[in-house]
């Protein structure tokens, strides 16, 4: 190629690239990408008047929100009435900033399913240091959504295909909206529903199971900003429903002290949408019973077993609705992946006298290990009496090649220093893996005993 031709080629290529870039810029600008209103502390002090904005995201505009008209919502070419619709509704915003999780949440939803994802931006109305004025706005936001959903229904949308995900005050907004349609809306997900001004209220003044065909509520901060009692067909109490692992316990930690537990509900649910690490929710009357291993039998949910927390619990809708209100518990890690891996641990000892103490169990696969300390209370070991425990490990170590046990006697007048184990069995509660057994072990005080598990005998053990 001659020098002249080469220069012409690069010049043509350059201007072509400029043209394409300008065209893309014009297209992007024509789309008028919208985001949630960003306010600040001066708005919090002055207070804000309610203004509800609806931001539509679909797989065609997953990173570019489109403002949905309240008067003519169907004029937006991206809005498809035949597709399911999910509303994402934030809660109280004392400082006025948009939630840090908002856009990733939308992305996870659209990666999971083709839908209309509508962010309900009521930041103007949620930003105010006067919480009680914000609470009054929740009814007005619900009226706005009721009007939109009514138009959708009149134009052929199926109410059962609507999913409302409400965070904190957004949970009760979802409930008020669902009540207007007599519970025909498909699903409401309440993420740490707000407690202040709603605790103890009648069902008509808060979220309740009659507001949708399936109502689920996740509790992560019930001793402060969240709601304590049951609100849905299934209520999840993560780590007991109050203090979350990894969240600061001191006020000197700054704003995270106030919002970490409350906000954890969103990240846990997002993880369930992402689907990378399922969490089993165990129906149980109390967190103590859950920790004591009394709630591992999910026979009433046959043939599917214990429900899975979060987005996929829809597969358990029929038994959940039939059972009324189900309280469930699970534990998590402090950061993603949040899921833990549970084992049913059954031990029979043959000491002549009662022994009390704690156990540490460690699993090895040859390259890595994981351990759990069963120390929430002292365990009683009685001769020839089976002791059942629930052990949750932070990782799934497979295949398990070695197990290490350590017995720590409980403090007392005459603590027993040796625990004679007739047999021990560890049964994985996920993945349908085979039980791990061992027979005839001697555990000395505070000493590790490592062994290779062997096949369990064909008996109850």
Image (cartoon, helix red, strand yellow):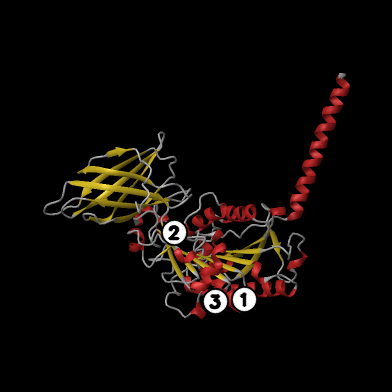
Residue shown at the point (58%, 58%) measured from the top left: 38
- Residue ID for mark 2: 259
* Structural distance between the alpha carbons of marks 2 and 1: 28 Å
Q: Secondary structure at mark 3?
A: helix
- Quadrant of image for the N terminus: top right
* Structural distance between the alpha carbons of marks 1 and 3: 18 Å
Residue shown at the point (55%, 52%) measured from the top left: 275
Residue 58, above or below 136: above
- Residue ID for mark 3: 210
* Structural distance between the alpha carbons of marks 3 and 2: 29 Å
- Residue ID for mark 1: 143
Query: Mark 1 vs mark 3: which is more N-terminal?
Result: 1
Residue shown at the point (43%, 46%) measured from the top left: 434
Query: Mark 2 vs mark 1: which is more N-terminal?
Result: 1
Query: Mark 3 vs mark 2: which is more N-terminal?
Result: 3
Foreground: disc 1 or disc 3: 3
């Amino acid at each position: 190629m001659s020098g002249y031709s080469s220069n012409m080629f690069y010049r043509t290529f350059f201007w072509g690239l400029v043209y394409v870039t300008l065209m893309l810029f014009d297209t992007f600008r024509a789309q008028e990408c919208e985001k949630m209103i960003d306010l600040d502390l001066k708005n919090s002090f002055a207070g804000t008047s309610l203004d509800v904005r609806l931001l539509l995201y679909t797989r065609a505009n997953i990173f570019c929100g489109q403002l949905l008209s309240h008067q003519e919502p169907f004029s937006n070419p991206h809005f498809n009435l035949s597709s399911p619709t999910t509303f994402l509704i934030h809660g109280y915003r004392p400082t006025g900033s948009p939630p840090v999780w908002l856009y990733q949440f939308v992305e996870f939803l659209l990666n999971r399913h083709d839908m209309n994802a509508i962010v309900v931006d009521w930041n103007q109305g949620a930003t105010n240091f006067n919480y009680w004025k914000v609470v009054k706005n929740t009814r007005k936001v619900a009226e706005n959504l009721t009007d939109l959903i009514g138009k959708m229904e009149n134009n052929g949308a199926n109410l059962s295909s609507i999913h409302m995900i409400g965070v904190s005050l957004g949970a009760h907004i979802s409930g008020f909206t669902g009540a207007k349609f007599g519970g025909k809306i498909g699903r409401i997900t309440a993420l740490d529903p707000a407690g202040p001004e709603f605790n103890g209220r009648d069902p008509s003044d808060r979220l309740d199971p009659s507001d949708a065909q399936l109502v689920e509520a996740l509790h992560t901060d019930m001793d402060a900003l969240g709601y304590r009692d049951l609100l849905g067909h299934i209520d999840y109490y993560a780590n007991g429903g109050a203090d979350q692992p990894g969240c600061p316990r001191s006020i000197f930690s700054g704003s995270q002290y106030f919002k970490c537990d409350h906000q954890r509900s969103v990240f846990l649910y997002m993880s369930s949408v992402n689907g990378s690490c399922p969490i089993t929710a165990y129906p149980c009357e109390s967190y103590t019973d859950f920790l004591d291993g009394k709630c591992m039998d999910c026979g009433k949910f046959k043939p599917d077993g214990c429900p899975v927390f979060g987005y996929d619990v829809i597969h358990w809708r029929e038994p959940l609705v039939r059972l009324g209100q189900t309280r469930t518990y699970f534990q998590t890690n402090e950061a993603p992946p949040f899921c833990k891996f549970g084992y049913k641990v059954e031990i029979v000892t043959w000491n002549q006298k009662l022994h009390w103490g704690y156990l540490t169990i460690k699993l090895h696969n040859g390259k890595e290990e994981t351990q759990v300390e069963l120390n929430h209370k002292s365990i009683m070991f009685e001769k020839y009496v089976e002791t059942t425990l629930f052990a949750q490990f932070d990782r799934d170590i497979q295949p398990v090649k070695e197990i290490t046990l350590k017995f720590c006697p409980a403090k007392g007048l005459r603590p027993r220093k040796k625990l004679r184990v007739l047999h021990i069995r560890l049964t994985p509660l996920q993945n349908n893996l085979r039980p791990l057994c061992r027979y005839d072990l001697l555990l000395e005080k505070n000493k590790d005993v490592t062994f290779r598990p062997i096949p369990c005998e064909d008996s109850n053990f």
